[in-house]
Amino acid sequence: MAFSPRFLDEVKNRVGLAEVVGRRVRLIKKGREHSGLCPFHNEKSPSFTVNEEKGFYHCFGCGEHGSVFDFVMKTDNMSFPEAVERLANEAGMEIPVETPEERQRQERAKGLYDVMEAAAIYFEKMLRMPEGKGALDYLIDRGISEASIKHFRLGFAADSRGGLKAALSREGISDQMMVEAGLLIQPDDPSRSPYDRFRGRVMFPISDRQGRVIAFGGRILGEGEPKYLNSPETPLFHKGYNLYALKDAVEAARTTNTILVTEGYTDVIALHQAGFKHAVAPLGTALTEDQIQLMWRVVSEPILCFDGDAAGQKAAGRAAERALPILKPDKSLNFVTMPEGEDPDSLIKARGAPAIDTVLAQAVHLSEIIWRLETHGHRLETPEDRAGLEKRLRDAAKRIGDETVQRHYFNTFKSRLWDEFRKNQPQTPSQTRGRRYAPSVQMAEKSGVSSKIDTIWIQQAILVATLIYHPKLFDALGEQLGSLEFTAPELDKLRQEVLKTLASSPGLEIQALRDHLEDTGFSELLNGLLSRQVINHANFARPDEHSDVARKGWEQTLRLFRRNQLLEEIRAVEEELAENPTREAFELLKALKQTATEKEDAEEDLSSFGDAKSA
């Protein structure tokens, strides 16, 4: 069976080479590539690499190489059609029926790229013509530079029903091809001639990952609706699966380890001009599941930037709800909200690029957005309020397809729900007098050290506080602290800010680090985190303690923290097993308990080794 190149490209884009290979090979990401032990020959050191961007794997030891289809064919002993069919089914794609009409359509599709390129060239020329002066003035007034106009190939469609049609006809392109490419509109009455779709608009070419023009977005000049008009669905263009400027953003995204998602074309261009070249935008629709997964092939946690208005908040909510079912380990989203009435373009014009950095520093995780969606407009004062919120959060977590991610979300929600509910309980003056430290520390004092939730919070606080008081330990401890999963959102934000600051400013002194953290909104948390109530749990964290002592204490706290996290996971799975006894839950509980036993044995061995060494 023959498959069109476009269909094969779409399958490869949707399934992801690293994900398919990762089922057979334990891959480690190194820069733009992944590496691991070759599955085609025995080796002790990895010589097998996967390049997701270029779409191929290669072994420098045995020479095996190929695409995702080759990998499935060789590892599962399949023919090429069988491999394509399996991967297409995994991607939720229908196998095209091979008919004479389908083969003819595929041949026409090859020529559509030439049609779209010819249209892009025509629009670019029209921008420089006298009739394009208004469009050029509009772009310049918007702050778009001449370099950006050329780089993004911006153009102009004259307010004419047949300007593009006539120009492309002179190049031998038929009306039917232009209709199929989405450039002309065919009236319902077949006796009437087709006419230009884009009229009186500034034109933004939309490219695929190979840089080929596949569609256009047009912004009307002056009054009129719709303000933005995009190409319709065509054999080349599926708007729910493409992103504006993705090809330009990929390299910068791999360097910054994130992608910025904005709402409009001009926002993307303004961000690129300001140095944020990892910005993209959806194409006239809310962010789709396919677009999210497309970005996950490049980075683990894209940042969604929405306008600071009601529509922007609604868009953020829709994106969060669409992301939940497809979440995977190490794949999520972060969100930032522009100041009210601003978008990235206007914010850069008003306050410059540093304002964008400030906004991005306030990014919150997807779990925080879900929390806000489920708590907005609801009380949290009574047991009934708490029960209602718990049900809504449980229902939200159940929408997550991956069981491991689902369990961690529910545990996080339960921990935070308990925290918030306790904060809303009435307290006597004697209980609250003189307390100036964080709410979770208050919980620890009231509930006692036996509370696992409080213990975990204190341990997280100690891990962060030690590094704040001993920033010179960053090289030794930073990577371990960065790999942890904190359940307390406020501590997790502080942890990320500390790591980011020390990574970008080696040798930073304690006071300079504290000043920076206070300036970035962590003043209240620091007053509690570095208070006597926390430090009394860990004298080794004090700034006057020797760094070797601080490091040993930190590492011991890390072991206890990981053990408590594991015990919390065991408790959560036991509860789940009691409510819904399944074989999967039983096997998971068995595996977790085995891990806990192994950790106990390892710690006993380590303790015995230390005793023998000291003796």
Image (cartoon, grey):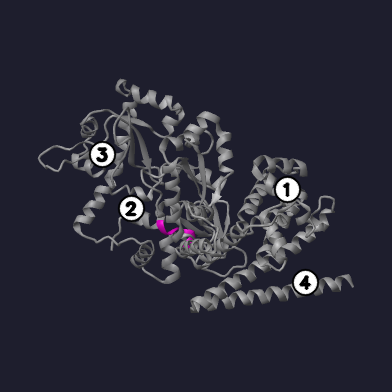
What residue occupies the far top of the structure in this picture?
Answer: 130
Magenta residue check for 434: no
Query: Residue 265: x, y in percent?
Result: 41, 37
Between the residue at mark 2 and the residue at mark 1, the CA separation in whole angstroms equals 58 Å
Between the residue at mark 2 and the residue at mark 4, the CA separation in whole angstroms equals 57 Å
Between the residue at mark 3 and the residue at mark 4, the CA separation in whole angstroms equals 71 Å
139, 237: nearer the viewer? 139
From the image, state whether disc 1 or disc 4 is nearer to you: 1
From the image, state whether disc 3 or disc 4 is nearer to you: 4
From the image, state whether disc 1 or disc 3 is nearer to you: 1
From the image, state whether disc 3 or disc 2 is nearer to you: 3
- The three-letter amino acid code for the residue at tag 3 is Leu
Which residue is tagged 4? 606
Which residue is tagged 1? 527
Please tell me which of labels 1 and 3 falls first in the chain.
3
From the image, state whether disc 2 or disc 4 is nearer to you: 4
Question: Going by the image, does 350 lie left or right of 178?
Answer: right
Which residue is tagged 3? 183
* Mark 3 vs 2: CB contact within 8 A: no
84, 45: nearer the viewer? 84
Task: Decide: is 587 above or below 391.
Answer: below
Residue plotted at (28% across, 49% down): 235
- The three-letter amino acid code for the residue at tag 2 is Arg
